[in-house]
Amino acid sequence: MRLFLVAVLASVLAGCPKGDELKSAALRVQLHYEGFRPGCVTLTVTDQAEVSRHVTTNVNVSGGAPPGTLSVAVFRQAGWSHDVKLLARAHEQSCEGAQVATAEATASLAKDGITPVELLLGATDGDGDGYVASSEGGTDCKDDDPSVGGPLPWYTDRDGDNYGSSLLPPVTACTAPSFNSVSRAGDCNDNDSQVHPGQEEFRCDGRDDNCDSAVDESFDVGGMCFNELDCQGVKACSGTNGGVACTATATPVPYYVDTDGDGAAGTEAGRKCGTIPANASTVASDCDESSRFRAPGLPEVCDRIDNDCSGVADNGVACSMDWQTPPVTDTTAWKAVATDGTTTVWVAGDDSKLARSRMDLTGGRYVTCDGDWKAAWVAASGELFLAGGKDGAGRFARATSNAGECTTEIRGVPQVMNGLVGIENPTGAPTLYGVTGGGRSFRWTPPAAPEQTQPNPVDANLRAISAAGRVETLLAVGKKNSNDAPVAFRFDAASSTWSEEAIPTTLTGELRGVHVVNANYAYAVGDNGMVFERVNGVWSAMKPVPAAYSNRSLQDVVAFGKTAVYVATTDAGSNGGAVLFFNGTDWSTVYTDAGSPARALRSLDGKTPTGVVTAGDRGTAASFVTNR
């Protein structure tokens, strides 16, 4: 049996030669549909004499709304009888869709010519969406809503990410068959709600997180990179956080900087594979980054320090370690001593006492200066600055190197000051910082009036203050008001406030002296033999002073690095105050006041380790000065 479109039926019959009986007769089958538009129509023709002989064809359905008609031509077939049965079936959507309508008829091809056959296919598609009502064998889930078609495949979603597992077969239904059924599949890990299609690969973990059959494609794993140390490496997943790290394939090398100002680099500042910062070196050339007076190549001088890093202090230098005392003394209680380091020593005390001399303490001369002076500092210009008070109020003073009288500044300082330090300004007068027993601090840049650095005092009796040329290095010490424990404060330049730093001790008493060597090193001393070192912002107890001095009050400290720390002590019984020296390993006594009765040493100063001066009670003073 052969089936042709009816559009060519007439031409086939017209061209049929005599004697071709198979083409001399045909059926013109009209397939009418109404109430719906089928997705596919199949027509089966069966030989009624032998039902095993049959043929089926799919008939194309053109677009357009129902009703409609499809035409098919059926011709004789060799070996068949002339009587046939016609069966039409209509399907939803496609030839594989649900069968929603049938029609059948019998016909004969015995007579030559065209025999018409009419078949009617009827079904209801109420909303015209191509799906027939379920009551008529269709699959429309809601036949009055064109937006709702036939049933959907539903997939089990175990992890709640709205994507079902692609490994389990779906359930087809109009509505979700269970609470964890979803209409989207493709989840390649239905046990992890973060893993599903429709997203970028969001974490580097060696897995496919967006179910696109690629692993970590967003992270260039294995690509070349440089880490924070400029070391070349390869990108790799960085563990449990899902990030990417640069795994170095090169080893960084340390580099060193000069932090003590001697021109030799010795402090490790970091490690890098690439270009190191300017003024850094890959070679550590300094033996001691705490002191600008120690570095390879420096000349050895007489100062108790191993200047050239040979391992021996003062090697090859013939010098005297003797201390000089003034040829004439009085009974003044000197509270402060200061020096310019080259030519002049100043001593100051209560009752307007101020005097100056040469570095060897000869050529002494009194200078008129009204006040009770507690602290002194000499600028690079040689000008002296004082801090103290009178009649319960604070005051500053200043005097040039050859002045016969000082100039006082009494504005804006309501409390007597105990400590003083200056910071040089390249274009004008230095800025002075003073501290008081009431926990206040004052700043004075002449000729302006002094001002308080912060509105509220700290909870401490402040005794001393020091800096290494920059305001960021300011430190102040004293004791807490609440429990008499030693206390230290660091000045925060940005907020102009003091921050307390931890002092690791169970001893009580006052810290009475502090000396900042540089930004990384500082030293503080106080009652009961307390002596502390501050390295990179952390305070720790130093090796205790010798037992003979452990119960004395250490009044002041001057340091030139971790191998050159001088401390001044009070007297004990018939033993006068002493200057102790720490060489980085051991303490030694380098000077003892020989006065009788015994006298305490109250103050120390020195710009360089070749010129150290001390002063104290009842006119005592001494200096260690060398030019070699």
Image: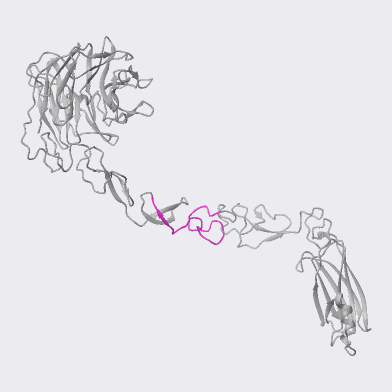
Residue 185 percent across, percent down from the top left: 63, 59
Quadrant showing the N terminus: bottom right
Instruction: Give 199 or 427, whichever is nearer the viewer.
Output: 427
Quadrant showing the C terminus: top left
Specify the quadrant of the image occupied by residue 92: bottom right
Q: In this image, 156 relative to 291: left or right?
A: right
Q: How is the image coloured?
A: one colour
Magenta residues: mostly which secondary structure? loop
Image height check: is 437 above or below 99? above
Image height check: is 19 above or below 402? below
Q: Which residues are magenta?
A: 200-227
Instruction: Give 38 or 9, whichever is nearer the viewer.
Output: 9
Residue 520 percent across, percent down from the top left: 27, 36
Q: In this image, 365 relative to 409: left or right?
A: left
Specify the quadrant of the image occupied by residue 83: bottom right
Residue 442 percent across, percent down from the top left: 32, 20
